[in-house]
Structure formats: C-alpha cells, structure tokens
Amino acid sequence: MGTAVTLDSRESRPERRGSPLGGLTRLLLALALAWLGGLIYFIHGLPRPGPDDGSRTDAIVVLTGGAERLEAGLALLAAERGQRLLISGVDPATTARDLEQLSGDKAAQFACCVDLGRAPDTVHNAEETALWVRQHGFESLRLVTANYHMPRALLLFQQTIPAVRVVPSPVFSGNVDLDGWWHDVYSAQVLANEFTKYLVSLLKARLADLG
C-alpha cells in the first residue's frame, strides 16, 4: 500500500511579490499629487493687486511678454521711480522705433533713459541685467514682469545679482485667472507651465548652493 503524500498548500503556491509596475504607478501617483499640491500652494502665494509702496530704486527692468509690462515700466520711469529703464528680452526684429510708437505719449523717454536687451529667456534676462547694472553702477532695481512669472524671475535675479536689491513690481494680466484657474484651460496651462519651470530653477539653485 502506497504512502499518501500530503503537500502543504502554502508550499505548493509560488511566493507572491509586489509588481514593479504597481510600485511605479504608486510612485508616479504620489509625485503627481505632490506636484498638484505644490501648484496650488504656488498659485495661492502669487502677488495680488494691492497698494504700491511708492519706493524708489536706482533702475527699472522690464521683462518682455506683454504690452502691459512695457506700459507699467514706462509709467514707473515717468514717475521717477528709477533713473533708467532696461527692457530685457526684446525680439531681434523689434527696433527702438517700434517700441516708441507703442509707448504713445511716453516716446520721448526712449531718447534719454531706455535701453534694449535681447535676452531670449529668463535666465539670460538676469545675466543681461547683471551686466547692465554693473555698467551703470546701480545698487537697486525694480523688476517688472507678470505676477505669475515673478517668483521664478526673482529667484534667478537674486541668484545672479545677489548684491543688488530687487523690488518686485508685478503686472496683472486679465488673461490669467488666479481665482478660477482650475476651470479655465488657458490659465491652468500657463500656471502649470510656470510652476514647473520654477521648480526646475529652484532645484538648479539648490544644487548650485551645494556645489
């Protein structure tokens, strides 16, 4: 009579292991949630319209990207909030004459007090401004750009010219809705793109500090 062999069902089943794909999915989900939380925090902290502090700086720098920025910079120059204005990021095909025509009654300011820079992006805006500041011996400047662009611009400017006092002067565009961005595709795209660029710039700045 043969001997019955009893197999332990636990031993007969292969050991289950966590799926690498499942782990990767959880990691990606966690990163996406962290990014979304950071985006909400970023948007909540963006400058909102409020009273101007009325302070004066040695110079004014406008980062191109909309007619409102140029208008704001020229208005600050006309109010003597700075002695000279740099418009950084002007398209190579755009001339000083073109900008004069856009400026209306403030065209006369171009002859005495406005310089044009051709930097292609925010990193080069900061480098271009650093050179301009050194040439003129300025110790403070007022930075004019869109409110959603201001955090990254300030980060790069403060990193590039740490000895210069940079005062933010945000411009508020009606095209980007900070309060209802989640149901406006254009606003959501602009803010998400800017937040991602800010994270990259912040990471590079931290790595530079460590190096």
Image (spheres, grey):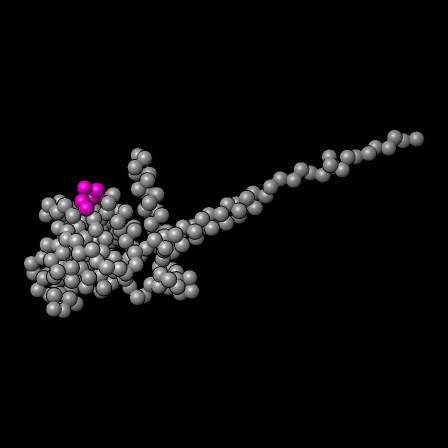
Q: Position of residue 71 (x, y in %)?
A: 19, 64
Does residue 141 belong to the magenta stretch? no
Q: Is residue 153 above or below residue 4?
A: below
Residue at the far left in the pictured view: 112
| Residue sitting at x 30%, y 56% | 47
65 left or right of 84 in image: right
Q: Is residue 180 above or below residue 143?
A: below
The answer to which of 195 and 8 lies nearer the viewer is 195
| Residue sitting at x 19%, y 61% | 72
User: The N terminus lies in which quarter of the figure?
Assistant: top right
Q: Position of residue 104 (x, y in %)?
A: 14, 69
* Displayed quadrant of residue 5: top right
Find the magenta span and give its range: 160-165
88 left or right of 84 in image: right
The answer to which of 8 and 206 lies nearer the viewer is 206
86 left or right of 36 in image: left
Q: Position of residue 208 (x, y in %)?
A: 30, 38
| Residue sitting at x 35%, y 61% | 178
Residue 80 visible to the viewer: yes
Q: Is residue 136 above or below residue 89?
A: above
Dominant secondary structure, magenta: loop
| Residue sitting at x 12%, y 50% | 58
Residue 89 visible to the viewer: no
